[in-house]
Amino acid sequence: MSPDDLRTSPGEQLSFGGFVRPLELTDLPELQPILEHWVVDRDSKHPLPKEVAADLLQMRESIEVGNEFQYFTAVGPNNNVVGVIGMRTPPESKLLTLPFLETNNPVELVNAYVAPDQRGGKGVGRALVSTLEQTAIAQGYDQVVLSSGPRYKDTGWGFYDRLEGYRRVGIAVGLFGPGGDAQVWKKDLTK
Ligand SMILES: CC(C)(COP(=O)(O)OP(=O)(O)OC[C@H]1O[C@@H](n2cnc3c(N)ncnc32)[C@H](O)[C@@H]1OP(=O)(O)O)[C@@H](O)C(=O)NCCC(=O)NCCS
């Protein structure tokens, strides 16, 4: 599948007025402040620059090296970068912490972030997840799984609860360290 096959048409008019396409290296400077806004300590809300840098490197390497991740960028009507989402085949070590899977071929949703002034009902997140799901189905995956830590309880969990087909299936205890129990959702892509 070519990158163009994964691109929604700008003419398709997604509800936020933009489109979703595979991540490009030139998106990274615009994604940095979005990550810096959301990737903060869950208690103190202090910035976590090392975690942001690691996420940006992971995104960069998905293009430059071809690591296990695939990322998609939401682009607004002014060609501005407004969000990102990623996916990968979960590694064996991660599967052990997620004993909720019913298939051998899940894809893991990771790193969903939308610009603070573009989130919460404009449809950016929904468009990103839709592209991820369509890509996953085309690549033969049959289930989406995601785990979200307490850091995102107020800003992210309600979103997944609203999405079609996503069910809370359990808690991954300590996935994000002491006190960092993660809520896990999954969606069957075969229905
Ligand atoms: C979670 C996130 C990616 C969703 O993207 P978004 O652009 O806000 O989502 P959408 O606008 O497509 O919202 C889809 C629906 O979910 C609702 N929604 C979005 N975030 C919500 C939340 N935190 N709680 C309850 N509902 C939420 C929207 O109002 C909308 O409702 P509708 O069905 O009535 O239209 C985005 O809000 C975000 O970046 N949050 C901060 C970072 C974060 O928590 N990331 C998740 C990490 S696991």
Image: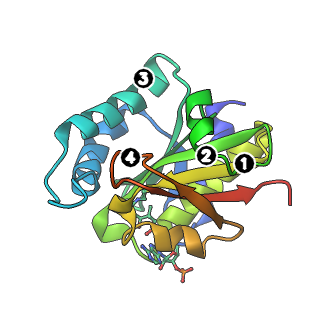
Mark 4 vs 2, N-terminal side: 2
- Which is closer to the viewer, label 3 or label 1? 1
* Type of amino acid at the residue the image marks with label 4: Phe
**How far apart are the two marked residues, 1 and 4, measured between alpha carbons?**
19 Å
For residue 143, side relative to residue 79 (left or right) = right
Secondary structure found at label 4: loop
**How far apart are the two marked residues, 3 and 1, measured between alpha carbons?**
28 Å
Question: Is ligand 1 less than 8 Å from the beta carbon at label 4?
Answer: no
* Type of amino acid at the residue the image marks with label 2: Leu
Where residue 182 appears, as percent x and y from the top left, is 47, 56
Secondary structure found at label 1: loop
Foreground residue among 104 and 38: 104
Q: Which mark is residue 47?
A: none
Where residue 141 appears, as percent x and y from the top left, is 76, 41
Mark 3 vs 1, N-terminal side: 3
Foreground residue among 114 and 18: 114
Q: Which mark is residue 98?
A: 2
**How far apart are the two marked residues, 2 and 3, measured between alpha carbons?**
25 Å
Furthest toward the right, the residue is: 191
- Which is closer to the viewer, label 2 or label 3? 2
Mark 2 vs 3, N-terminal side: 3
Question: In this figure, which residue is indicated by the disc labeled 3?
Answer: 61
- Give the answer, above or below, for where 114 lies relative to 16: above
**How far apart are the two marked residues, 3 and 4, measured between alpha carbons?**
23 Å
Question: In this figure, which residue is indicated by the disc labeled 1?
Answer: 101
